[in-house]
Image (cartoon, coloured by chain):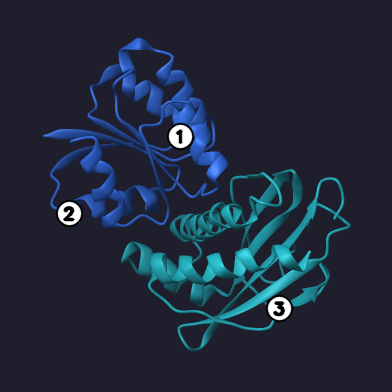
Amino acid sequence: MKTVLVVDDSRIMRNIVKNTFSSMNIPCQFVEASNGKQALALLDGQKFDLVLLDWNMPELSGLDFLKTVRANDRYKSLPIIMVTSEAARYNVIEALKNGATDYIIKPVNEKSFREKLSKITF
Amino acid sequence: MEKYIQPFVDVCESVFREFIGAELITERPFFADKNDPHDWDISAVIGLTGEARGAVVISMKKPLALKLTNVLTGAEHEDLDDEVIDAIGEIINIIAGNAKRGLEESFRLVISLPTIVRGKKHTIMWPNEQARIICIPFKIFETESFCLSVAIESSEGV
């Protein structure tokens, strides 16, 4: 079973993401973090198949998490999809330039997840 | 400043449709004064910085905050607890983040993390003196209402 790291400071959003995967019948095991710092610590001790990453979070933002992770060769091929309300094109470009695999704008739905997940053969 | 308001109206309508599953009725926006009396029970504030300064605030009464949280979580709440704060904070976060798309031709914005203010007759400390506050009233669920207040001005002056 695939293991997904869901990083979002909103517990409600983490649950919505998990429920969306359930309703798509994608069996996954989820691990949750409420900021980038927690996510970095989890990444250090466990293997993940996918990271779903919010942008605006306390402690360490999603973008700073992304920069840190992509600077480490160990995580070069780890799929990281930004899941964020930051909808401006300059935000999307900045995330992709810094190594995001793809980008989903909140509010999330099954369609957006299906489309993005199909690209990474998850 | 008024031209900056339409993206917030459009985004608010679409976010409530997609995220909450509710249609809004947008009422006539009006200029508000920060000292105007109100009877909202909870407000969620997002600060705007970057090439413009300001804030966007959603304000509502307790029953609507509880109802919106119920829609998002499936759980009943009686008080403005942490989960309600999370829900209202996420709603304003999604509105502000999506509105940046409609404003990107005018300026690049950075949005803050949401701050929640609760309590009868609570006061919002608006970050800049010059920008006028536009309040956009919305009706939802037939009998409920909330207000989206926006104050925004270019960092170089509008």
Q: In x, y percent, where is residue B124?
A: 74, 60
- Up/down of B32 relative to A73, above or below: below
Residue A56 seen by the camera: no
Q: In x, y percent, where is residue B41?
A: 61, 71
Residue sitting at x 46%, y 59%: B87
Residue sitting at x 42%, y 76%: B22
Lateral position of residue A14 relative to residue A22, left or right:
right
Q: Which residue is mark 2?
A: A24
Residue type beneath disc 3: Pro
Identify the secondary structure beneath mark 1: loop
Nearer to us in this view, B60 or B7 = B7
Query: Circle 1 marks a residue in which chain?
Result: A
Label 2 crowd (10 A; few <14 / some 14-19 / many >=20): few
Q: Are marks 1 and 2 on the same chain?
A: yes
Nearer to us in this view, A39 or B107 = B107
Q: Are marks 2 and 3 on the same chain?
A: no
Residue situated furthest bottom in the rendering: B143
Mark closest to the chain's N terminus, 1 or 2: 2
Colour of chain B in the rendered structure image: cyan
Per the rendering, the mark at residue A35 is 1
The CA span between labels 2 and 3 is 40 Å
The CA span between labels 3 and 1 is 36 Å
Residue sitting at x 51%, y 72%: B13
Lateral position of residue A55 relative to residue A29, left or right:
right
Lateral position of residue B4 relative to residue B73, left or right:
right
Lateral position of residue A85 relative to residue B27, left or right:
left
| Chain that is blue in the image | A
Residue A35 seen by the camera: yes
Identify the secondary structure beneath mark 3: loop
Identify the secondary structure beneath mark 2: loop
Nearer to us in this view, B40 or B94 = B94
Q: Which residue is mark 3?
A: B29
